[in-house]
Amino acid sequence: MIDEAYQQVEECRRRERAEPDRHLEELGAALFQLSALLTGVPDRFPELDGVLAEAVEVYRRLVRARKPEGLPGLALALDQRARLMGISGRPAEARELAVEAVGHFRRLADDDPDAALALLATALSNLGYHLAELGLHHEALERLREAVTVCRCLAARNPAEGEPELASALVALGVNLGAMGRREEAIEVLRDAIERHRRLADADLDEGLVALFRVPQPGSLNATPHESGLSDRWVALFALARELTALGHADEVQSCLGEATAHYRQLIRIRPDLHTYMLALARRYGFTITDDGHIGLPTPPVAPDLLARVQELNSQALQFSRDGSHGLAVSTARDAVELCREAVRAGPGMTFALARSLHNLSLVESWGGKQSDALASSDEAVRLCRRTLVAAPDLVRPLLAEALDALAGRLSALGRPAESLVAAEECVALYRQLAEADPTSKLPSLARVLNSLSIRLTENERHQDSLAAVQEVVALYRRLRADGAADPDPHLLGLLHALANLALRLARVGRDDEVLAPAMEAIDLLSDPGPYQDPDFLHASNNIAGLVETLTWLGQYLTYLGHRREGRVVTRATKRLARRAR
């Protein structure tokens, strides 16, 4: 059939060459027919990309000629090619095409809602997935919420068409909310989606199960349209189980997995060819499928020698960075990541080690000034932590908190304050849980990330909230220093940052008469030789450059407020710190 479709396309091309612009509609239809057949053959996806690219150009010509078929065909061709690029791991290109497709579908829906609303909703969901794959979760959330709104409108006009689309859009929204750490919202949306899918299920279960299978959502798995993709209901069950596990709702998790197991066993009798794809999806969400079809938490073995080698490489990378050899640190960390990737291809046992290695890679990339690379590594580390949280929450939760802190810093450095704040707030929430269970080891981390949250709040113009956060930080560090007597003081640097930040926040909200005290307390701490006795005090991870910048501003501000002597003291101490940091 593919050969015949190619012959039809070639015949249409021949006619178009003989009579330009007279046979574009026929050529576009033939290209769509060929693309539908190629979609079922993953090995021929490069051909499919070329066919869809030609279809885009054909329909652009029809749009320029003001033909009625032009705009709908162009929107569909763009959307289909965007899906293919998403599946093929090209989310940036997919996003560009998907944005254009959504724009065209909006115009079509304005002119004929009955014909185009469902297509607009699907295109919005697809765009949301591409944005999420690029780490643009806030933008993705906007598009996915819009898709749900469109589907509600469609369901009100035409329930038979709109209800399935609404259930699908809710799954997409719930998955993205979970990826952003907004678990309670995700659970509510996913429950709604699952209930709608249950109501939509066909009375003939076997037929209904097959009918539920859809083209895979772009970027959701490295799967192909030929493998059909898992039903939205399946995705929703896995996503819901993951979020419930993170919140400790074990009974409901087992109910979700029991429902997923029942569907799997029934479906695999009808479509045994889908086993590989379904196993990959289960692994993505942190689950496994046993030989008898039971879905549950994995207990994969990890090769101790390989794990030891990965840990050694990670330790070396961090040490190289501390020594100032940033290039060597990055290359060593990448070696650890690649070892883990190779192991994960054979099974999920090294997924946590991969997440840890990616987090370490993001750190050394950031310390070496490679912020864009660091963002990509941090984002992948966070996504992997979310997937493995179900299998080992006590092990993964601390790493997820660390990775979110790093992600917030990278997003802030690259000018994305709203997304940075979301990551920082989730990070603090996790560290509060961890500190409640283990205050001795986790309170210092809570204080540190609270100070970062204060800065993120300021970047989002939430100055009173920022002040409240840093006041809590200062109180925590005072408590930690009072409880310990280590030399060098492990909390001195944290208190320095917090006091300088507190002085800034007080100035920002107009409480000028309170700025002097924390600023001078910071300088008193800095004047002590204690900080410089710590060999790691001046490392890039401690953000001495940021401390210097803050203290420089405070010295000038104190002078402006009439505290000239104190301003000079702050300026001299800051210059001394800056010289040592060079």
Image (tube, rainbow, N blue to C red):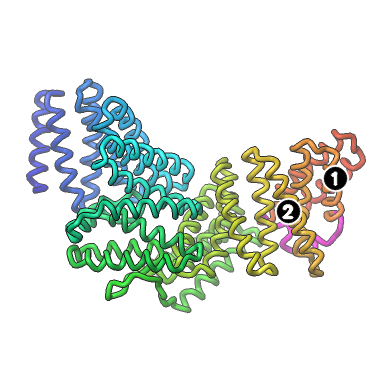
Q: Any magenta on residue 530? A: yes
Residue 211 position within the rendered picture, expressed as x and y whole percent measured from the top left: 20, 53
In the rendered structure, the answer to whether residue 377 lies left or right of residue 118 reads right
In the rendered structure, the answer to whether residue 185 lies left or right of residue 210 reads right
- Residue 134 in the image: above or below residue 390: above
In the rendered structure, the answer to whether residue 184 lies left or right of residue 226 reads right
Q: Secondary structure at mark 2?
A: helix
Q: Is residue 361 visible?
A: yes
- Residue 168 in the image: above or below residue 396: above
Q: Any magenta on residue 227? A: no
Residue drawn where x is 26% and y is 51% of the image: 200
Q: Residue furthest top?
A: 66
Instruction: Please state which amino acid type lies under the numbered disc 1.
Output: Val
Residue drawn where x is 49% and y is 54% of the image: 184
Task: Give the residue at mark 2.
Answer: 472
Q: Nearer the viewer, mark 2 or mark 1?
A: 2
Residue 182 position within the rendered picture, expressed as x and y whole percent measured from the top left: 50, 52
Residue 20 position within the rendered picture, expressed as x and y whole percent measured from the top left: 14, 23
Query: Would you identify the image quadrant in which residue 204 lies?
Result: bottom left
Instruction: Please state which amino acid type lies under the numbered disc 2.
Output: Glu
Residue drawn where x is 83% and y is 48% of the image: 518
Question: Relative to the observer, which residue lies in front, 220 or 513?
Answer: 513
The CA span between labels 2 and 1 is: 24 Å
Question: Magenta residues?
Answer: 527-540
Q: Is residue 43 visible?
A: no
Task: Give the residue at mark 1.
Answer: 570
Query: Would you identify the image quadrant in which residue 93 lies?
Result: top left
Query: Mark 1 or mark 2, which is nearer the start of the sequence?
Result: 2
Q: Residues within 10 Å of mark 2 (few under 14, many from 20)?
A: some
Q: Residues within 10 Å of mark 1 (few under 14, many from 20)?
A: many
